[in-house]
Amino acid sequence: MSGVPGHDGWELVVGLEVHCELKTATKLFCGCPNSFGDEPNTNVCPVCLGLPGSLPVLNQRAVELAMAIGTALHCDIRPSTFHRKNYFYPDMPKDYQISQYDEPINADGWLELPDGARVGIVRAHLEEDTGKTTHAGASGRIHGADYSLVDYNRSGVPLVEIVSAPDLRSPAQARSYAAELRAILVATGASDGKMEEGSMRVDANVSVRRAGSSELGTRCEIKNLNSLRSLAHAVEHEAQRQVEVLESGGVVRQETRHWDEDRGATVTLRSKEEAEDYRYFLEPDLVPVVPDDGWRSAVAEALPPMPAARRRKLGALFGDEPVEPGGARSDQVATVVDLGLDELVEAAVAEGVPAALALARTANEAATDADAARRLPLVSYVALLRMEATGELTATQVKTVLADLLRDGGGDPAELARERGFEALSSEAVAAMVADAIAAHPDEWGRYRSGEDKLTGFFTGAVMKASRGQADGKAVAAELARRRAEP
Amino acid sequence: MRPSPARTASALADAVRSGSTTAAAVVEESLAAIAHGDGEVHAFVTVLADDARRQAAEVDRRVAAGEDPGPLAGVPVAVKDNLCTRGAPTTCGSRILEGWHPPYDATVVARLRQAGAVVVGKSNMDEFAMGSSTETSAFGPTRNPWDTSRVPGGSSGGSAAAVAAGFVPLALGSDTGGSIRQPAALCGVVGLKPTYGAVSRYGLVAFASSLDQVGPFATSVVDAALLFDVIGGHDPLDSTSLDRLPPRMASVVGDGVDGLSVGVLTEHLDGAAPDVVRRVHEAAEACAAAGASVEEVSVPEVRYGLSAYYLIAPAEASSNLARYDGVRFGLRVAADDVVAMNTATRTAGFGAEVKRRIMLGTYALSAGYVDAYYNQALRVRTLIAEAFATTYRRFDLLLGPTSPTTAFALGAKLEDPLAMYLSDVCTIPSNLAGHPAISVPFGTGDDGLPVGVQLMAPALAENTLLRAAAVVEAAAALVDGDGNAVGVEEQR
Ligand SMILES: [Zn+2]
């Protein structure tokens, strides 16, 4: 769905800028630990405090992770340089940020959304993070604070900023892009993707235009989007605000706006006129980064499969039946990939479990405790699903046994089923119960015999009830059909 | 008047290493000379007497224990006050860093200590190395030991004066546009600016990062080579440090110039005083007499060096000096909010020349002006480097004056920034190209004050540079007019 919700005739144009903290052992330009949540100002040194005379030395691992992100986003990985972005702020020790400017390490890539749409990636460049300021006082903002405390532990932590093209057309698509990007960042091993801890931070550039127009409207940049939910809300509200401004004859001003989660609205942070002149120039303390072909291919080879490829691989398990984008099965595939449970599905299918069953159990039941499911011995999981496929256990029984497996971290599913008393009923027992049900419901039996097939469910239900769920539905249906065929 | 230098560093280190004297005695002699003479010269911002005695005792302990005390064992060294010394004040000649004690040693300082040298004090400088006379120091000017009514040059004037006055045989300075060579020339000592990247900048408080380079002052070329050998070589803490082994220049200094070709750079003769030009020609003749082929050469592009420099250096400085905001270290002037505090701190902490250059540099980088100023200056810098590359296909070395004049009077140029900036016209091109250059004393001018001649070479050709410098140095003793050395006592 595209467009501005609630406003026909308008098109929404969104591009996202995502800052991702890299999971390196040390900071971007010094040897201090890169770790979240430590005692303030303990992971600091002359370099990340910007002390006079200190100089930056680039962390090779950070470059590799940036290259991994670029590779995963189908970017050109290029010779790159660092610039200084100059502005004063107390949590920025040098009062300039070292960032890549006109020569980023990654440029011109794309990201494929789960629905198949491609979003352009303009660039994904390296830069250093700032420290963190806490303003003490009623406002919680710098203005009106009694005093401010600065923690430089985060100063110099490596970031990759990923800038999308303005290719997103709805709040849902913006959210889907951010979710997919997060999955890619986690898959590359570059980031833990935790928005709540700030290791992934999203800014949205939002503009609107008349449907059919090819010109871009004036955009506003929305900051303070702390979850995927607030991203979608903020984009929707900002688009509606802009449409209302334009429809009432006003003009959208280019500015930076702050998403106020409590009020459910964006508010002006600063206008374009107040924007800083960053006076970028080439960082003279660093040399260009020129990854050679060997380095590039080593990074590419070390890269695990990305979510889109994994989704395709799961989809291929269905053979000729395509997985419709946006359908229930496509959602299940996305869930399995998001949670990293692909292997469970693939192993089960390899052992003859029908793909639909393997996917459903994994996306619906195994997913309820994905951490435990990822640790589960594949052999236990596959054996359990085979018992369902062959009718040894019913779906209900399988779900119960799976919960036991997840709780215990593995085990023999046959054993667990026996402990639970989940013996498959013999065909004689099923036949006897079907006979009982027929005897108890002669009218329904008559209608069934004369061709009312939908009564299969009625009799199956009756047998299930009598067997307390232990009968296999398929076996019951087969017995009913056999009895009907008797003269 | 001719001050009398200390004994050479090589002689002192040999004496300490062989046990014929002690580091303690050498250092006491240096401290006594400073105590006696520095009241008038003011070469030092901080004298580190206690530290120096401790370091000397450690050197003597090593000698007594039979350990190698290092090639500079017991040699007193003055360190420019923009090089970080762990636990000791490092002011850059500025109020804004008053009271700041770095928690670490600059790489060059660490290498000095490792070589057995003893840091006796931090030498005075123009504030943040911005100046050519050491008059912009917040702690008062340094005076030229040859004539205390004259400036010692700058910005490393304290280091040059400390060596010239005989306080120390060696000193470290930094050279961004001539800040080692010009004061070396004005004080009659040897000053080397190495190839950019040959010496680590880690712990050198930045002025203009793409131009700054640390280098030695000494009373002789061989001593300068010795100190360069100690401080040079790759440093993993400086990304622009060249990936090379430490230099070994001291052993090749005596190899002469036979077969080398020397170009006398006419552009640098044009604006120089006639007595200075005469000395340059004499130095050229000395090279020819020693077997070099010498001819005049024009490199017109160097005329634009000064203009390019005064855009590039302030631009980088405007960014490098942003961190002096009162938040983390040094001076803080309290105010109602953080922006007012930043402003009040910088207003009180920086002197007029520093503020002028921050404003120039900020302007040169500003949106709408960056192309016409900063980027244009970068293009000029490239042109100059290319012109040098072409010239060095024909010549091994270039020769000219270091400074257009001998030492000028205190206050003569302080109110006229452009006149002051012109003091560096001959030294700036080497910084823009990243090339090594050296100033060697060569007699005196009509006023009896020292003249320095400058030798320039392509990147990493310190070898040929120092060989030629030694030839010029040897010839200087012969052309010297009055020839009779005047003792330290008389000079004071
Ligand atoms: Zn650090």
Image: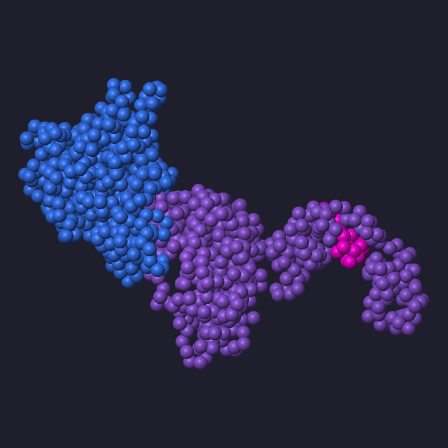
| Relative depth, front residue between B340 and A341 | B340
- What residue is drawn where x is 64% and y is 56%? A336
Query: Where B266 sits versus A445, above or below?
Result: above
| Colouring chosen for the image of the structure | by chain
What secondary structure prevails in the magenta region? helix
Q: Is residue A121 visible?
A: no
| Relative depth, front residue between B423 and B398 | B423
Q: Where residue A198 sits in the image (x, y, percent)? A: 50, 56
Q: Is residue B84 left or right of residue A161?
A: left
Classify residue B214 by image quadrant: top left
| Relative depth, front residue between A54 and B340 | B340
Magenta residues? A378-401
Q: Is residue B250 left or right of residue A29?
A: left
- What residue is drawn where x is 66% and y is 47%? A375
Classify residue B22 by image quadrant: top left
Q: Is residue B110 left or right of residue B186?
A: right
Q: Colour of chain A?
A: purple
Query: Where B382 sits versus B164, above or below?
Result: below
Q: Colour of chain B?
A: blue
Taking the magenta stretch, the answer to whether it contains residue A11 is no
Query: Where B41 sits versus A273, above or below?
Result: above
- What residue is drawn where x is 28% and y is 35%? B48
Q: Where residue A215 sits in the image (x, y, percent)? A: 42, 72
> On the rendered image, what quadrant is the N terminus of chain A found in?
bottom right
Q: Is residue B77 visible?
A: yes
- How many circles with numbers are drawn on the protein? 0
Q: Is residue B297 left or right of residue B75?
A: left
Q: Where residue B368 sits in the image (x, y, percent)? A: 28, 62
Taking the magenta stretch, the answer to whether it contains residue A388 is yes
> On the rendered image, what quadrant is the C terminus of chain A found in?
bottom right
- What residue is drawn where x is 53% and y is 46%? A301
